[in-house]
Amino acid sequence: MYFGLMKQRYLAGKTIIVAGAGISGLSFALSLKKLWPTALEPPNVIVYERETNIAPNGREGYSLSIAGFGETGGLFAARDLGILDEIIKHATPGLGDEFTFNVWDNSWGEILKLKFKPAPGLSTAGIRIPRKVLRKVLVDALGQDHIRWGIGCVGAEKTEDGRMLVKLSGGNLPVGQSVAECDLLVVADGASSKIRSSLRPDDGLSYAGIMQKGGLAIFPNGIPKPVDKNWGMVISSGKGVALFVSPYDETSVAWGISYRSSTIEPPLDSIEDAQSMLDECRELGKEFSDPFQAIINATNPKDVSRLAARDKKPFNHDLTAGQVIFIGDSNHAVSPFSGYGASLALKDGWDLSSQLCHATSLSDAVKAYDAISVPRATKVLKESHSRINMGHATGMNYLFARAFLSIGGFILGIKDAISHA
């Protein structure tokens, strides 16, 4: 027992700053709170978040997929964190007990339905949940006392005594305070991480060649079929355009239409720009049958966004530059086409905390963490690029992709029929 407690003394009573109260940052802070030995003085964990504790505009229709069909899935971390039942309670309704992903043609004819089985120990193979709801569950479990809302971490540097000096910015900063010191900095400030740009200026995002425009469609009288109980992707007939759709709650649908573009279009900057974008979406998806046009017509220009699909490769840590660890999108950003970003974020937080609580030194903990997280994120990044290529194929590539999907659907259909015989 004494030796076990001795192992964590390198963090006992120390100060840990978490840059960002997103999914990965909250997962880490909550994981450390749950895993830390009760007989040992805990570290002082402070989470800084540049946003307020209110869902910002443009994220009302932002939903996430959390996997539970393999041990790398986020539902495993949710179970270990003690929040699994709560997030399942708030999961997107109407998708049934099975976790499936659909691929439709431009007339909403089913090309492929992927069905996933829950991994051992889980009740479901996956869920979809609004991001703001998942974050609230994590915040409630962690406790507000750990979070400093309205204060962002914008830079960091190593001090002479080996600690980290973190530069702060925001409207909620106490008068005269612009920096904070810590013994360990955990960076979880997202794909466009300011800390990463400060410490790793050459390690930026790469454009995946795809633009996506989307929003939240509201149907007070009920969501039209087949989107009421299904989610997935609609692909065009070789024109390189794809449509993602998913129920968001009982009366709304999150959607995004994507296409190849050699240039990155800027974010929306006005309500007029948003309305113009909706008109562009109508034209982009003109070959898609209803309910596509109904979805566009039911979308308020205030609830739309335009973004470029960007990602970056994961990296192993080198602590010689300072005691800094990057998790979630700040280390390995993935585009929405991965469908696994939230799972990576939840697992990163849990796995890093677990290694910190079991290793005899910070360097050993980080080495063990990298051995888990880097291969996992590399695999997800590769798979997301495959989905992009398949969903936006043109010419002969489209014919090959369509044949592959159709054959896959046929084989899976046979297997499903046999399993239910």
Image: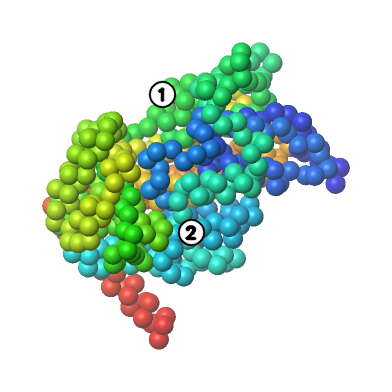
Q: Residues within 10 Å of mark 2 (few under 14, many from 20)?
A: many
Question: At which x and y percent is residue 252?
Answer: 35, 56
Residue extending furthest toward the right: 2
> At 27% across and 42% down in the image, what residue appears?
301
Q: Which structural element holds mark 2?
A: loop
**Nearest to the observer: residue 360 or residue 104:** 104
Category of crowding for the residue at label 1, using alpha-carbon neighbours closer than 10 angstroms: few (below 14), some (14–19), many (at least 20):
few
Q: Amino acid at mark 2?
A: Ala
| Closest to the observer, 307 or 393 | 307
Give above or below for 394 relative to 40: below
Identify the secondary structure beneath mark 1. Answer: loop
Q: Provide the residue designation for mark 2.
A: 91
Kindly identify the amino acid type of the residue bearing the numbered disc 1.
Answer: Asp
Comes first in the chain, label 1 or label 2? 2
Of 48 and 250, nearer the camera is 250
Q: Residue at x 64, y 44 (%)?
A: 142
Q: Nearer the viewer, residue 2 or 328?
A: 328
Q: Position of residue 184 (x, y in %)?
A: 65, 28
Q: Which disc, if any, is residue 202?
A: 1
Label 1, label 2: how far apart the Cα atoms are = 38 Å
Residue located at (45% from left, 24% from top): 197
